[in-house]
Amino acid sequence: MINPQNHLEPSHAEVALLAFTISQSQKGRHRTAEDNWLEAERIIKEQRLLALTQEKSELKYTKSKQASGKK
C-alpha cells in the first residue's frame, strides 16, 4: 500500500535549496539553519498538498461534467 504522505515528502536537495534561499533572503534577520530547514520543508509540503487537493477537485469536476453530458 502506498502512503499518500510519501508524495508530500521533499527530497534533501529540494529542502536544501529552499532553505538556502530563505537564509539569503533574511536581510539582517538571523535564524538558525535548522529553522530555515524546517520552514523550507513546511513550505514544500504545503505547496504539494495544495497541488494534490486542486488536482483532485479538478478530477471530480471533470468526471461530474462528463457524467452530466452523457444521456
Image: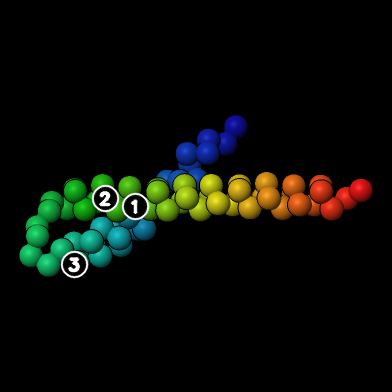
Left or right of residue 20: residue 57: right
Question: Looking at this rendering, what residue extends furthest in the right direction?
Answer: 71
Q: Is 41 drawn above or below residue 25 in the view shown?
A: above
Q: Assign a secondary structure to mark 1.
A: helix
State how the image is colored. rainbow
Quick check: 65 left or right of 39?
right
Spatial CA distance of label 3 from label 1 is 16 Å
Which residue is at a point 61% across and 47% down the rendered structure image? 56
Q: Mark 2 belongs to which amino acid?
A: Glu
Identified by mark 3, the residue type is: Gln
Residue 45 visible in the displayed image:
yes
Tell whether label 1 touches label 3 (CB within 8 Å): no
Q: Tell me: residue 18, above or below residue 41.
A: below
Question: Tag 3, which secondary structure?
Answer: helix
Residue 11: x and y, percent? 39, 52
State which mark lies toward you, 3 or 1: 1
Local crowd at mark 2 within 10 Å, few (<14), some, or many (≥20)?
some
Residue 12 visible within the image = no
Q: Residues within 10 Å of mark 3 (few under 14, many from 20)?
A: few
Q: Mark number for residue 39? A: 2
Cβ atoms under marks 1 and 2 closer than 8 Å: yes
Per the model, the C-alpha gap separating discs 3 and 2 is 14 Å
Q: Is residue 2 above or below residue 54?
A: above
x and y, in percent, of residue 30 in the image: 9, 57
Residue, far top: 1
Q: For the N terminus, which image quadrant?
A: top right
Residue 43: which numbered mark, if any? 1
What residue does disc 3 label?
24
Question: Who comes first in sequence, dot 3 or dot 2?
Answer: 3
Q: Secondary structure at mark 2?
A: helix
Label 1, residues with CA under 10 Å away: few <14, some 14-19, many ≥20? some
Residue 42 place in picture, x, y as percent: 33, 47
